[in-house]
Amino acid sequence: MKWGEHPYDEVRAWTIEQMRSRIPNYPAVLADARHGRTVKYFEVISGATWRTDGSEGAPGVNVRNPITGEEVKLGGPGVIELSSYAARFETAVAAWWRAFERASHAELLTAVGDGIASIEGYLNRKAAEWNAMNPEDRLEDTPKRRVAFRVNTEDWVIKMTGRSLDKSKPFWSNLLEIKKYRDDVAIHQKATVTGVTLVELARLLNLFTTGIAVPLFNFHQLFQQATPSPIIRAAYAGEITVSAAA
């Protein structure tokens, strides 16, 4: 509730006791959260991707970032991503679930690739907004001048927020590990065959949570920004374990 995209600013400061006393049917709302169902009152479920049918006489659809001035217009049938990084994370979570349900290493690679891309997309979005407000002190990452991942996640974040992620926390080393795995296996795959034990697959699935979802959630907190619920849910996902068959 504190970091979600809902509009109720008052509840962001509530204690657990205040939640219990002020939220109608609190036990039912709590049960919904625990069982993965939509959390009434507080969870935005519309998602980052919207569709337009472009029927005759229907108005066009415009989406504009008010800070950078970037704008997308559709006059016919199509899809618009209200937040590109959030849409990418939604696809990452979907692949993560498929990897879990099917014990699929290939789906895991898709989840990891889209997950890291969503972090990069979020930081690039914040950099674009910074540049719009600070044209004399721009943060640049272009095809001709690539910026290293650790520059984006450390130097840029400190410059824009005055703070940084706590690198003593486990999620920081997990982020660097899963980023390297993305680079070595998901992007620059050299092996013609692949094998992974279920124990290792479970470990990598958990690294998606602790090394991608948790840091992305923490970046939102550094920027004091409401967070899409798929990120919050993934950050609090339970640990995956492997048990012997009965």
Image (tube, grey):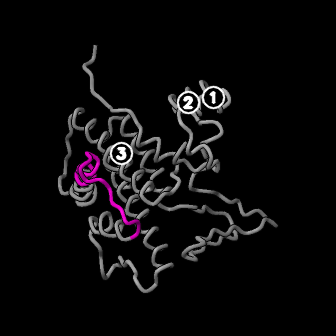
| Label number found at residue 107 | 3
Q: Which residues are magenta?
A: 160-177
Q: Quadrant of the C terminus?
A: top left
The residue sitting at 39% across, 52% down in the picture is: 218
Q: Which residue is mark 2?
A: 17
Residue type at mark 3: give it. Answer: Glu
Single out the mark in the foreground, 2 or 3: 2
Q: Position of residue 37 (x, y in %)?
A: 56, 33
Q: Residues within 10 Å of mark 2 (few under 14, many from 20)?
A: few
The first of marks 1 and 3 along the sequence is: 1
Q: Is residue 222 left or right of residue 49?
A: left
- Please name the residue that numbered disc 1 is placed on: 21
Category of crowding for the residue at label 3, using alpha-carbon neighbours closer than 10 angstroms: few (below 14), some (14–19), many (at least 20) = some
Determine whether 123 is above or below 192 in the image.
below
Residue located at (35% from left, 43% from top): 209
Q: Position of residue 232 (x, y in %)?
A: 47, 44
SS for tag 1? helix
Residue at the limit of the structure toward the left, as seen here: 191
